[in-house]
Amino acid sequence: MLEQDRIIKINIEEEMKSSYIDYSMSVIVSRALPDVRDGFKPVHRRILFGMMGLGNTSDKPYKKSARVVGEVLGKYHPHGDSSVYGALVRMAQPWAMRYMLVDGQGNYGSVDGDSAAAMRYTECRLRKIGEDMMTDLEKETVDMQNNFDDSLQEPTVMPARIPNLLVNGASGIAVGMATNMPTHNLSEVIDACIAYIENNDIDIEELMTYVKAPDFPTGGYIYGMSGVREAYLTGRGRVIMRARAEIETGSTHDKIVVTEIPYGVNKAELIKNIADLANEKKIEGIANANDESDREGMRIVIDVKRDANASVVLNKLYKMTMLQTSFGVNNVALVHGRPRLLNLKDLIKYFVEHRHDVVIRRTQYDLRKAKERAHILEGLIIASDNIDEVIKIIRAAKTPNDAISGLMERFQLSEIQSRAIVEMRLRQLTGLMQDQLHAEYEEIQKQIAYLEEILVNDELCRKVIKDELIEVKEKYGDERRSEIVYSSEEFNPEDFYADDEMIITISHMGYIKRTPLSEFRAQNRGGVGSKGTETRDADFVEHIYPATMHNTMMFFTQKGKCYWLKVYEIPEGTKNSKGRAIQNLLNIDSDDAVNAYLRVKNLNDQEFINSHYVLFCTKNGVIKKTLLEQYSRPRQNGVNAITIREDDRVIEVRMTNGDNEIIIANRNGRAIRFHESAVRVMGRTATGVRGMTLDEDGQDEVVGMICIKDPEAETIMVVSEQGYGKRSDIEDYRKTNRGGKGVKTMNITDKTGKLVTIKSVTDENDLMIINKSGITIRLKVADVRIMGRATQGVRLINLEKRNDEIGSVCKVTSENEEELIEEGEENTLESPQNEVNNENEE
């Protein structure tokens, strides 16, 4: 045949399709995807088979890794030596395999990403659990196939007494598909397998009571179960892994100590990433990060700066580094040679079915061998019963074949029996050995009956599988390493902010900020104060409120709208800074302004929001009560909280429990006291009813409303425009019906100026006063003596500038709270957080 006659012309497009399909299937079936039955790719299966062939078992000395790699390459796996050695190394790494199959000696790499030493230096041998993957391989339990040059046989799958695919997982990239399966706890998986054996109709939800979540060799936390559940139900999902970290409190600073990291994370790169984020100021509060790991275990120490909150720093590390990461589950494995996406029940089902096939084939093998032995024993027993005649026939025969033929003819024996008799040693002719032959024959008959029962009785076969799984669990089962945290895997924004005490200030022109309470120090009564918020010309601080970072702030505008913000969403500023325009944070109309606020810990607490009320008071003395639940669904553009008449505006908003006493004060120095039960509950958009009748001079208006919780412990504090103030007993204010003019609460004169505010206070409170020029003073309420209701009071703050006057007054918790608690007065105190809860959530 000429050379040109051997050239076949074909369409290149068709040839590419055909060749690429062949290549793809080769990669999928013979390289990248594991078999669902034993969890091995061909290279791992060949490594273990080659080591067993070398006698490289757990009870023998180590052999050089190069010896094993050469054995595997030369006999079974004609690919690169680096791929074989890489697969061998991984099976010996404790941070990669949940249950290592190979026992390595030497440098096998590290969790820092260091590579293993060259194969000529390292040594290895099988672990006992690796040997158990091949138990009964010699009993024809699995199909064998020719190796690449048809010179040897290799198994197509291992007998696999261990559910390797589930416990050790797998990963690989094929053509057009990939697999990524997490590791699991052996004890949990075996319990699930036993549950499936007992009830094949068990559903995945019930199986998940046994296999709760993946169990990674590096430990850490499994954070949240939604992704785990999705993976078990569908075969695909996302498992959130989080490092195990503890905060150690020191005398000078705190430390974050990491002892376990997520699966697959490079420790050295993790520490470098943390250092880079700290140096770039992307995470504030980190002074240093060191690796103090040793042979005792992992220990990454992150030093936190003195003024930083360690919990907040840790949460930011979870968010921005590999201290928290996800494992994308994609359970793709080969089922009958075809790739399939498998859920949890599928993985257990195919393993149990494989074990069933192995047990049946092993039983058939053992039964065949037992029957062969029984057949021989029958002949030996006949020979021992007729020993003299047997000896005579053998001695008379000229050749062994003549002896065999003579025995077959005389005793109707088979050739196999006759040959066994001829080959029998003389010591087996003793009486003792004859008894042993009979005993062995009886025992083997029992074994044959048992094996035959296994083949015909499926329940017994299942029991054998269960007993072997229990044996494996007892040998290799251990405690779970990855702890499950049954909470949301999503970050809560509050995790990145410490729940610190803050002062929120809002200026007359609508600028807002939050400032740490620690920036404000207490002064004595009559002090000049310290420089506070810088404001624009003609602007001044109009509202000042205490809060904590995790509180939900409800802002109520003078036109009756309600908006919501978390305190951490409010920009932080120093005591002297101006703040930020509130219109940039809330969608407030340009002609509206915030006049009141409430603080709630949790608007999702149904019991709380359905047992508390929002109480409104307007400039013109209108009061309205609405269930808090009506305001529990935040909207970006706010909602109408109360219908306000054209010449009116919201002055005060309080939260009550429905059983408080109310005091409303007006600018002309009068106040009215009544029980809130006199105000019926109305809808969110209602207008309200009259709470106080004002003077008809055209200048009178409501300046404040307070809710009294404990009349015996609280006193009434009033402050005037010119800095005068006093405290009076609540009982000085007689109870009346709502809607009246009230009684005098302060003697208003030109010297005092009009009334600015009214507050309910205790001796443990401080008072913060800010005048319209921006000067702030903080004084102790206990320094202000209790006086009669109709008196003018004493000077609280010196106004240094002419035409200056008080702009805003707020009560806060005393800085001496800890000292008071040490003196045994804890039950009389309210922390800044509880103060507002008690005042506004009553």
Image (cartoon, rainbow, N blue to C red):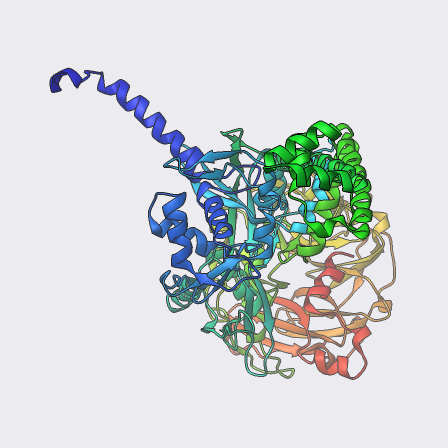
Q: Give the x, y percent position of residue 666.
A: 71, 59
Q: Give the x, y percent position of residue 655.
A: 74, 54
Task: Establish if 157 lies above or below 553.
Answer: above
Q: Quadrant of the N terminus?
A: top left
Residue 607 shows up from this direction: yes
Q: Nearer the viewer, residue 624 or 220?
A: 220
Q: Nearer the viewer, residue 169 or 685?
A: 169
Task: Report which quarter residue 174 is drawn in.
Answer: top left
Q: Residue at x 73, y 75 (%)?
A: 726
Task: Report which quarter residue 702 is drawn in.
Answer: bottom right
Q: Quadrant of the C terminus?
A: bottom right
Q: Nearer the viewer, residue 673 or 380?
A: 380
Q: How many marks?
A: 0
Task: Say whether residue 416 is left or right of residue 623.
Answer: left
Q: Give the x, y percent position of residue 259.
A: 56, 67
Q: Give the x, y percent position of residue 273.
A: 41, 63
Task: Report which quarter residue 440 is drawn in.
Answer: top right
Task: Say whether residue 795 is left or right of residue 466.
Answer: left
Q: Nearer the viewer, residue 557 or 34?
A: 34
Residue 701 shows up from this direction: no
Task: Establish if 101 lies above or below 248.
Answer: above
